[in-house]
Amino acid sequence: MDASSTVKTPPILTLTVNPALDVSTSTAQVTSEHKLRCSATRIDPGGGGINVARVIRRLGGTALSLYAAGGPTGEAYRQLIAAEGLPTVMVPIHESTRQSFTVDETATGKQFRFVLQGPEFTETEWTACLDTLAATMPVGGYIVASGSLPPGVPDDFYARVARLARSSGARCIVDASGAALTAALAEGVFLVKPSLRELETYAGVTLDTPESQADAAARLVASGAAEHVALTLGGAGAVLASASGVIRSDVPKVTVISTVGAGDSFVAAFVLRLAQGRTPAEAFRAGVAAGSATASTPATELCHREDVERLEAELAARA
């Protein structure tokens, strides 16, 4: 449906201004100057907020997805989303939606991820995203602003999103990096989910011990930049900092196949459980479970509900 359609806004809204048509395949070995014969190709609608909404749906919830798309790639993207039955609002743009390309090297188990630059946005296009967001904001609910910003979109875009959320009584969750993350934290958000590298870049220091990682997350909360900081550490687990203190979780034992979408899955389960009335600690466990479940699936595949619930129960039993 387009932005002018009547939409009953659910309590969770995701925003994706730089979606990508995810193409994934595998080959025996990646070498230069050779034709690389590949396996069957998988195509998925990717991008932070869209992945969050897709996982929320898989876990039995509903999220409205606001995204920008254009060109032939954007039309293919729209059709893939429609096939999954996601409620959406699309903001049309002139240039074509980007693609991303993932290749698994079967001889070594290595994964190569090629992330293409997004289309150039005009000021009219990115302001249309904000105007559409303001019109669909889930008052009292959650807005998940996730993913990179394409060329032409200002660094303070997510800060503007956070400002809109606050004025509407919604809680803003940001999953970004670099200047976009810095600007959002300066504005103040409900939850931020940095990776270790992203938090180190923001803090300007190396965080190579569990104590330094927990302290950095706690300092963000104390500064007022975020009410909750969920620091994801890959195989080393995750940390959640809030005014109530800092808690840490190990990851459940799974065979890691591909980490594509794991961070988005963490955010999806976390915000869904909060929307369902669970405590932040319970939501945190669900996030770790969902991220781990996605990491155990191939290529750009996302987690499955039964796996998430099983791992969630396993983590709860450890607590």
Image (cartoon, rainbow, N blue to C red):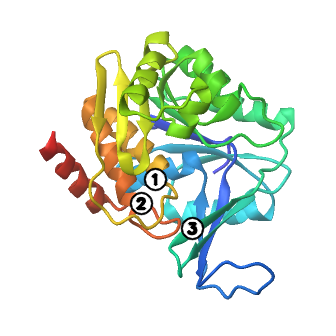
Q: Quadrant of residue 71?
A: bottom right
Relative placement, left or right, of 204 versus 210 is: right
Q: Are marks 1 and 2 in contact (CB under 8 Å)?
A: yes
Q: Quadrant of residue 278?
A: top left
Q: Nearer the viewer, mark 2 or mark 3?
A: 3
Q: Residue at x 83, y 41 (%)?
A: 121
Which secondary structure lies at badge 2?
helix
Q: In the image, residue 35 lies at what x, y percent?
A: 76, 87
- What's the distance in space between the residues labelled 1 and 2, CA to CA? 6 Å
Q: Earlier in the sequence, mark 2 or mark 3?
A: 3
Q: Nearer the viewer, mark 3 or mark 1?
A: 3
Which secondary structure lies at badge 1?
helix
Q: Residues within 10 Å of mark 2 (few under 14, many from 20)?
A: many
Give the residue pinned by disc 1.
Answer: 262
Q: Are marks 2 and 3 in contact (CB under 8 Å)?
A: no
Give the residue pinned by disc 2.
Answer: 295
Q: Residue at x 52, y 50 (%)?
A: 87
Mark on residue 111? 3
Q: Is residue 190 positioned above or below 302 on the image?
A: above
Check disc 1 and give the amino acid type. Answer: Ala
